[in-house]
Image: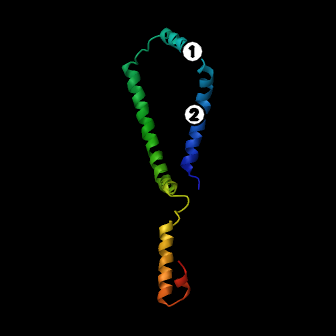
Amino acid sequence: MRCAAVSSVRTVEETVKSVIGPVYEKFHLVPDELLRIADRSVYPVQHPQAPARSTASDIAAAVYSKCKPAAKEAYDRFGAKVEHCAETTRQRLFPPAPNTSCWMEKYNEKVVTAAKKSCRVPALVP
């Protein structure tokens, strides 16, 4: 059984690879020294002014307040399925087979039981 979470993670990974991949392919052979020169030539970052910071925090709070109910609904809706998927992932694919000592113990019990019933065959069996 495939979990929805696994396919979602795979989708996110593929999206990130498709976005970051071309940039990596373009710049992975650029020498480090050239990148250092480019870093020095960029103007220093100016810190945002107070109104911009407050506006950004207001926007973030508004987005959070709108997304929180949707996230809670998704958690309530899919939480049990994700937990079930996690439990089935932790379980063994094949149950463990009984070991030799278990089989030997069962064999000895059968031989003793047959000998008590006065059968002749168990007396000949090792």
Q: Quadrant of the N terminus?
A: bottom right
Residue drawn at 59 percent across, 21 percent down: 28
Residue drawn at 41 percent across, 22 percent down: 52
Q: Amino acid at mark 2?
A: Val
Residue drawn at 52 percent across, 54 percent down: 89
Q: Is residue 77 above or below residue 98?
A: above
Image quadrant assignment for residue 30: top right
Considering every residue shown, the one lying at the far left of the view is 50
Q: Secondary structure at mark 1?
A: loop
Is label 1 or label 2 in front? Answer: 1
Residue 126, horizontal then vertical, whole percent: 53, 77
- The residue identified by callout 1 is 31
Considering every residue shown, the one lying at the far bottom of the view is 118
Residue drawn at 62 percent across, 24 percent down: 25
Residue 68, horizontal then vertical, whole percent: 44, 43
Q: Earlier in the sequence, mark 1 or mark 2?
A: 2
Q: In terms of depth relative to the viewer, which is nearer, 5 or 126?
A: 126
- The residue identified by callout 2 is 16
Q: Amino acid at mark 1?
A: Pro
Q: Residues within 10 Å of mark 1 (few under 14, many from 20)?
A: few
Q: Which mark is residue 94?
A: none
Residue 99, horizontal then vertical, whole percent: 50, 65
Q: Secondary structure at mark 2?
A: helix
Residue 63, horizontal then vertical, whole percent: 45, 36
